[in-house]
Image: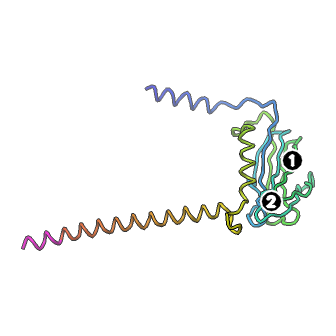
């Protein structure tokens, strides 16, 4: 009974609209580069009016990029590898954007809504700093300098998954073989 009451209260609390935010927030978009379509992460974002968006260049391979709104509302400076560029959105609306040298493969959109419109939970300043550091580290390479670290980790995890799957299949086959042999022994001993 207490569990049902608790779940009912939690559902009611989640259904309540979030209070309007008086302060502005900062959100980060990683520039992942032309090799990683759509070139931005996240490539679609919803923010409040007067929030700021910081584009952080974490592209691999490293390159300099310039971002422009499709309607010409903004154009960034050249953003070198490891650098960032910040923009505040003073009006509601949808801002689609692209990288000027790669408009077909590097694109995104930002939806700016009224401050009274509830959004998903925002990150704290400390979480945002951790996210920026993670984005900056994302493009680092492994010890041999040729393969991105995340790729090495992914390949290692895939190898572990394959070995574990083969071990499970062999174990099942061994048990099946034992069961089959037990059945045959029973048939022969009954004669």
Mark 2 neighbour density, 10 Å: few (under 14) some (14–19) many (20 or more): many
The residue lying toward the viewer, choosing from 21 and 163, is: 163
Quadrant of image for the C terminus: bottom left
Say which mark, if any, is on residue 121: none
Q: Quadrant of residue 75?
A: bottom right
The residue lying toward the viewer, choosing from 86 and 157, is: 157
The residue that label 1 is drawn on is: 86
Quadrant of image for the N terminus: top left
Question: Residue 127 location in percent, x, y?
Answer: 71, 41
Q: Residue shown at 80%/38% (left/top)?
A: 25
Q: Is 140 above or below relative to 191?
A: above
Q: Residue shown at 9%/71% (left/top)?
A: 189
User: Disc 1 versus disc 2: distance between alpha carbons?
Assistant: 17 Å
Q: Secondary structure at mark 2?
A: strand
Predominant secondary structure, magenta span: helix
Question: Residue 110 location in percent, x, y?
Answer: 80, 49
Part of the protein shown in magenta: 184-191
Q: Is 23 above or below relative to 80?
A: above
The residue that label 2 is drawn on is: 107
Q: Is residue 4 magenta?
A: no
Residues at discs 1 and 2 in contact (Cβ within 8 Å): no
């Amino acid at each position: 009974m207490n569990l049902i009451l608790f779940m009912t209260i939690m559902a009611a609390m989640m259904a309540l609209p979030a209070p309007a935010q008086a302060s502005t927030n900062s959100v980060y978009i990683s520039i992942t580069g032309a090799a990683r379509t759509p070139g931005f992460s996240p490539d679609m974002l919803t923010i409040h009016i007067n929030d700021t968006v910081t584009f952080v260049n974490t592209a691999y391979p490293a390159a300099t990029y310039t971002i422009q709104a499709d309607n010409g509302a903004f154009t960034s400076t050249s953003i070198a590898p490891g650098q960032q560029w910040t923009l505040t959105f003073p009006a509601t609306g949808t801002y689609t954007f692209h990288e000027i040298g790669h408009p077909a493969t590097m694109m995104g959109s930002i939806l700016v809504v009224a401050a009274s419109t509830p959004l998903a939970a925002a990150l704290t300043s400390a979480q945002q700093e951790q996210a920026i550091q993670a984005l900056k580290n994302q493009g680092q390479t492994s010890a041999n300098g040729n393969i991105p670290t995340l790729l090495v980790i992914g390949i290692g995890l895939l190898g572990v998954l394959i070995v574990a799957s083969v071990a499970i299949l062999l174990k099942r086959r061994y048990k099946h073989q034992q069961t089959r042999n037990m059945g045959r022994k029973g048939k022969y001993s009954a004669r």
